Image: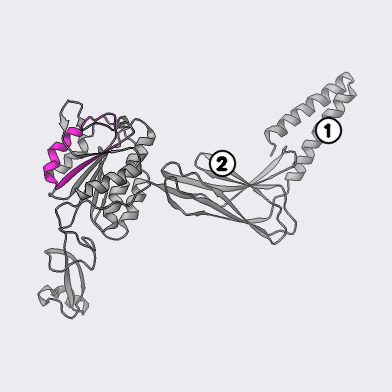
Amino acid sequence: MLSATGWGTLAAGSVLTGTGYAFGYGEAAALGLTCLLAVAAAVLWALPAPVLGAERRIAPSRVGRGDAAEGVVTLTNTGSRTRRGLRAVDRCGDRDITAAVPPLRPGTAHELRYALPTARRGRVPVGPLRLERTDPLGLARRMRPYGGAETLLVRPRVRPLPVLPSGQAHHVEGPASDTADDGSLTFHALREYVLGDDLRRVHWRSTARTGTLMVRQMVDVSLPHTTVVLDTRERAYASEDDFELAVDCAASVAHAAARSHFPVHLLGETGPLLHTDGSGDDAEALLDGLAVVGRSDLKSLAGAFDGLENHRGGGALVVVTGTDDTWGLGAVDRVRHRFDRVTMVRVGADARGEGVREASGARVGVPQLHVASLDDLLAGWRREAAR
């Protein structure tokens, strides 16, 4: 219950009191007793437990990196006395956020708002909330926890990008939606018969089992596929900020395709990271997944392209990497013929030059965008989409 100042005052009071009485120094003894009395009064001040109701929420619970997020705490005095000297302390990640609480009369409520840190991606634990009651001199305090911990999800920042044309017909509803064009050869689901349906698609076994005429629904899957290779190697980036920007770039590209209900395949040098089929809330799920992508200590990016040698063909391949180590980038030449178009995004202030040379000296002949900010990505991507 004693603060550092309180323990120091207690120690000083004890020494002064003992010294004063032992050697006959009345002034020292009086000063020591004053210190001891101050500590005792502080303990009695902070001792009563406040009778309060507390609710905390995070608004919003998912934000882009650098966007505003707040902790909102509503305190209600459910006791019969006015409460003073309170402060709320909320744990956010590895730091404490403190907010002063004004005097609360019986039956009144007060809402506290404080900013939460969103500078870095990831799951940020928030809480538990603590209420502290301290004396006016700051010698003693009493803490009481309220509620449990919640999570603030800090996701990558994104820019609205167009989807790169890749030689496939775009479908406005996506490859696996219930409103996709009929007539394809790919089975999607069974549904009830609607007047005008082709009777050749009646599924008689399901019809007999359910007593309702059921037909096969077929969808069009010949839609643009976007494959994004995100280089997460620590050695590929000059700084942590460059890596965060690379994740933002990969998220913007993937989000643009998923938002249009097109399939997205996200890879790293360790293998697949995320995959969406173009249905539901894939765009939001991609951002949630990229919120927790970290850096690796692998030396080469070549492993990211191993599985692409058996790619079914078509679509766009986007490689997002840094400006430092390029080991393994030459592997893109093994798979580039499997895609309609290939683009490389090089992230960092030092991204300059006409091309990239792999560590072996081989030139990687892939169109490049040099990006030092998300605004650079937006401008360059629009030019690439119009090419």
**Mark 1: which secondary structure?**
helix
**Quick check: 256 above or below 374?**
below
Q: Dot 2, how many residues are within 10 Å of its Cα: few (below 14), some (14-19), or many (20+)?
A: some
**Mark 2: which secondary structure?**
strand
Is the N terminus in the top left, top right, bottom left or bottom right quadrant? top right
The one nearer the camera, 336 or 175, is 336
The chosen color scheme is: one colour
Label 1 with label 2: CB-CB less than 8 Å: no
Q: Quadrant of residue 170?
A: bottom left
Q: In this view, does 2 lie to the left or right of 158?
A: right
Residue under the point 17% across and 67% down:
181
Q: Quadrant of residue 218?
A: bottom left
Q: Where is residue 189 in the image (x, y as percent from the top left)?
A: 20, 67
Q: Is residue 112 left or right of residue 332?
A: right
Q: Quadrant of residue 346?
A: top left
Residue 23 visible in image? yes
| Nearer mark to the viewer, of 1 and 2 | 2
Write the start and end of the magenta stretch as one range.
322-346
Residue under the point 68% across and 55% down:
51
**Magenta segment includes 338:** yes
Task: Tell me the kind of residue under disc 2.
Answer: Asp
Q: Position of residue 32 (x, y in %)?
A: 82, 28
Residue 273 visible in image? no
**Quick check: 153 above or below 215?**
above
Q: Position of residue 387 (x, y in %)?
A: 19, 48
Q: Is residue 107 left or right of residue 370?
A: right
Query: How far separated are the C-alphas under marks 1 and 2?
Result: 33 Å
Which residue position holds label 2? 96
Which residue position holds label 1? 34
Residue with the most extreme top position = 23
